[in-house]
Each structure stands twice: as C-alpha cells, then as structure tokens.
Amino acid sequence: MKNAMLIDPADNVVVAIEPISKGGPVEYDCGGETRSLTALEDITIYHKLACRDIPQGEPVVKYGQHIGSAVTAIRAGQHVHVHNVESHSTNV
C-alpha cells in the first residue's frame, strides 16, 4: 500500500501521506510504477523524505522546484526538514 507521494517526477523528495516508522517500507508511484525504499527515521505525516541520495550542497526539489540546498548529505529514506536543508527565500 502506498504511504508516500511523489508530486513531480523531477522531485528528489516524497511526502509521507501517513506516519512512517523507522525501518518501515516507503512506497510511492513514479511514472505509473511503484517504487519503494526503507525509512531511515520515523517520518511524521506530511513531512518530506529523500527518495534518492542528495549530496551536500545539492538542490532539494519538491513540486519540480528548487526549495533549498542540502546542508549535509541526505540518504534515501531520511527525513528532509530544517535540520538538513537550507531554505531559499524568494522574499526581498
């Protein structure tokens, strides 16, 4: 059963659509195909987790848009949030 959602095919994060326990499966659709990985941490509903490795300094992509940069290397299955992403504000 799918418990995460990939919003845009260009995204490197998925959104948990239910709470996911550390060590549990993460399943989501990508281009009509079901993909899965293992959660490396407990993930709260509606929070992001990496669906592939994101090297330090690389963009974090959600909605097909660059929403920030990884301040540390983020492994597939890790929680993606303020502790490991530097946001890019568009406010001037």
Image (cartoon, rainbow, N blue to C red):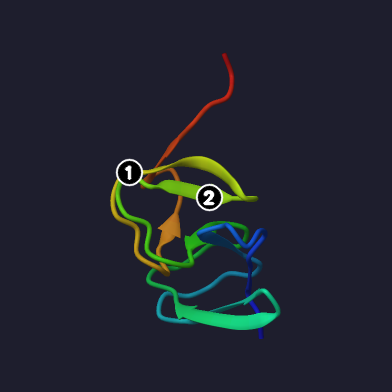
Verify CB contact (< 8 Å) between mark 2 and mark 1: no
Question: How far across and down, in percent of the image, does residue 41 sit?
Answer: 40, 68
> Mark 2 and mark 1: span between their CA atoms?
12 Å
Tell me which residue sits at (40%, 68%) in the image.
76
Q: Amino acid at mark 1?
A: Gly
Q: Quadrant of the C terminus?
A: top right
User: Which of 22 and 68 lies nearest the eye of the viewer?
Assistant: 68
What amino acid type should be assigned to the residue bearing mark 2? Val
Identify the mark at residue 61; answer none if there is no mark.
2
- Residues 58 and 37: in front is 58
Q: Position of residue 18 (x, y in %)?
A: 64, 70
Q: Residue at x 35, y 64 (%)?
A: 75
Residue 19: which quarter of the image? bottom right
Q: Is residue 91 above or below residue 55?
A: above
Instruction: Check disc 1 and report the residue beneath it.
Output: 57
Secondary element under disc 1, as helix, strand or loop, is loop
Residue 45, numbered label: none
Asked which secondary structure carries label 2, the reply is strand
- The quadrant in which the N terminus is found is bottom right
In this view, which residue lies farthest toward the right? 32
In this picture, residue 9 sits left or right of residue 77: right
What is the crowding at mark 2: few (fewer than 14 residues within 10 Å), some, or many (at least 20)? many
**Residue in the picture at 52% in, 81% down:** 36
Residue 7 horizontal/vertical position (percent): 67, 60
92 to the left or right of 31: left
Of 51 and 32, which appears nearest the observer?
A: 32
Q: Is residue 51 left or right of residue 27?
A: left
x%, y% of residue 47?
Answer: 56, 57
Task: Tell which residue pokes out farthest to the bottom in this image.
Answer: 1
